[in-house]
Amino acid sequence: MTATPVAPHDAAERIVIPVSGMTCAACQARVQRTLAKTPGVVDAAVNLMMGNATVAYDPSAVSADALVETIRRTGYGAELPRAERSAVEEQAARDEETAAEFRALRAKAIASGVAGAIAMLVSMAFMTSSVVRWALLAITAIVMAGPGRHFYVRAWAALRHRSADMNTLVALGTGAAFLYSVIATVVPGLFVSHGVAADVYYEAVIIIIALVLTGNAFEARAKRDTAAALRALATLQPPSARIVRGDAEIDVPVERVRAGDVVLVRPGERLPVDGVVVSGASAVDESMLTGESMPVPKAAGDRVIGGTLNATGAFRYRATTLGADSVLARIVQLMRDAQGSRAPIQALADRISAIFVPTVVAISLVTFAAWLVALHAGGASSAEAAVRAFAAAVAVLIIACPCAMGLAVPTAVMVATGKGAELGVLIKGGEALQRAGDVTTVVLDKTGTVTEGAPTVTDLVPAPGETRSADELLALAASVERASEHPLADAIVRRARERGVAVAEVESFASATGRGATGVVDGTGVVVGNAALMAEWAVDVAPLGADADRLAADGRTPVFLAVDGRLAAVLAVADPIRPTSRDAVARLRAMGLDVVLLTGDTERTARAVARAAGIERVVAGVLPDGKVAEVRRLQGEGRVVAMVGDGVNDAPALAQADVGVAIGTGTDVAVEAADVALMRADLHGVVHAIALSRRTMRTMRQNLFWAFAYNVVGIPVAAGVLYPALGILLSPVIASAAMAFSSVSVVSNSLRLRRARIE
């Protein structure tokens, strides 16, 4: 037999298939095992919380339709995703489904709870009445066929596919209790003749169903809460846009906006689509997308993002990226992908879930047999022993809870990725979330990461005896440099504009490559450049030599200015560190992390920047392949490395690192090489990502511990191990309440991450 060839991972296509009907970890594990065994499937990740399966597959070996059919054959619903819907629309539909699920479960829980209360009161008041027993039989049958119907339908579907899940346990427990009660109602003499009271458990069956449904309803509400951040993002886009057509302004649905349309936005309105400002000015609140609390000034030529809030002025902008290509849709898609992914720590829960239900059924049978033998040996009649053994076996079936194990990790991933988005940190999946918590060394690129990434004039020192003002000297330098294309020249011109200094026309302009430029401004000869250019023009730079050396020692580039053959000033141009870099580095070091500055710049400049940022270790003068080599060397020392860069020149090093972090703005969210994308250029995002990961991993471990501990302790107690010593024996009703509590407690613990202070 020839094995089906499978495409390499990077050549495989990827599809996210909605899956319905999954209720516990065993369901999730069964779908995942089936998909993983399908020829042509490269990788499969099934998410219980998101209700979907993310499959990487070779389209030459298996089709998307075949994958859907494979899932359906396991007993669960599946359908192809709707290609025409954007991520925002998909999330809106998902939110509506989750809300509908919660409403349906709440109604079922209330109905069965009321029926259970009535059944309990009636059975206590009229315990021996045969009429009441028949009435309770009818009520119980209605509850089982109505609110509790899906337990039995799904259990039967699992049985037909030779599998078992949480529904199997509930169906077996309540079904056995109901069958026992029916026999006691129809032929009570069968029990009486053996000296055993013909007790019935109708109220127990109803209350068990009510409690399990109540737990499911709380779980559904908690699932809805875990997606709060996604829901908030999905609702940012307004339903309509005001566009300019000719001389008229018309409102159209946002789906009908086309690239190139001019959109009008007034104060207090949300921007419907991405675009570029063409007229007007305002300040835009981008906090929901970038985490930046202060409104960002916008003027003609600036990019704006759909979903952000216009704070003050009115402006017009031209629509650019729309629909699935918009920044908001890409962010929502990134978060959906991340929340649908799996953290490696989930593997342990999956392995246990795969054998959990069959093991519990086996324990239940052993419990029944052990109680039967023990009671019979203690002198009880066979019938009495069977009744007691039956109650213990049902309690074991009911108390076992694979749901908690299935929810322990995905709920934490969902809440954590949502919390990260609120902080302006997009974490691309559960694996990246887990790895970030293990980081021991943070490697920072210099330009654009620790620094602003744009040369800026930082100093202007006049020569001794110079009578012109600083602005007059800056105007002369900028007038010449305006004709140059050098980055340092651009910094000088930009500084002049910022200060409102008038820049004159230059005549006789000449560029001296690598040294500077010369020209005539208003009849005055001006030379701007380094010491070598000054020497060519016989200008003595000694009067400012000490200042130039001091500036160079601080990592700044000295640029001399000579006017009519005499030294007039020295300007310093540098790429200043970001205002937040020093504090962020201090926080990283306070977290016990080693911080390394890795740059292609000179040793002198790198050391100056490192001193300003509070970084002790510097690796300078390395090209992109040298950055990769340095990351590998650190990994070879056993370190877990996070590489932080701009996501473009640093892409190879980002890919090599254990965790790649791309620092930038909201338009840079799709950096392929990075595991984490920061929505704004602030190293505090790295602090937040690592702190959030550590907090989330602690929550995951707590969830898994309680999920396992609950079952490890609860099942033996339900089986009766404490009865000989302490006389403690759980009834099936108490067991069902404990089962419902276990799932809710795990989800509630994950929800604590929403309120956590991440610093």
Image (tube, rainbow, N blue to C red):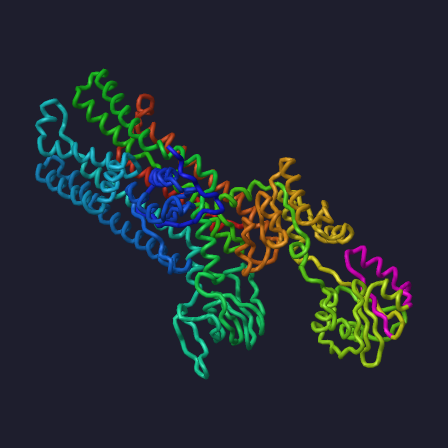
Residue span colored magenta: 538-563
User: Residue 416: x percent and y percent?
Assistant: 48, 48
Q: Nearer the viewer, residue 493 or 135?
A: 493
Q: Residue at x 65, y 46 (%)?
A: 443
Q: In this orientation, does residue 579 appear?
A: yes
Q: Nearer the viewer, residue 239 or 199?
A: 239
Q: Residue at x 13, y 30 (%)?
A: 198
User: Residue 389: x percent and y percent?
Assistant: 23, 25
User: Is residue 683 rendered magenta in the image?
Assistant: no
Task: Give the image quarter of residue 565.
Answer: bottom right
Q: Nearer the viewer, residue 285 or 8?
A: 8
Q: Residue at x 40, y 45 (%)?
A: 747
Q: How many marks?
A: 0
Vertical arrangement, residue 498 with respect to residue 170, above or below:
below
Q: Residue furthest bottom?
A: 247
Q: In this orientation, does residue 214 appear?
A: no
- Horizontal relation, residue 594 to residue 745: left or right: right
- Horizontal relation, residue 546 to residue 20: left or right: right
User: Residue 730: x percent and y percent?
Assistant: 29, 31
User: Residue 242: x percent and y percent?
Assistant: 44, 75
- Horizontal relation, residue 97 to residue 479: left or right: left
User: Is residue 547 rendered magenta in the image?
Assistant: yes
Q: Residue at x 27, y 34 (%)?
A: 162
Q: Nearer the viewer, residue 71 or 720?
A: 71
Q: Quadrant of the N terminus?
A: top left
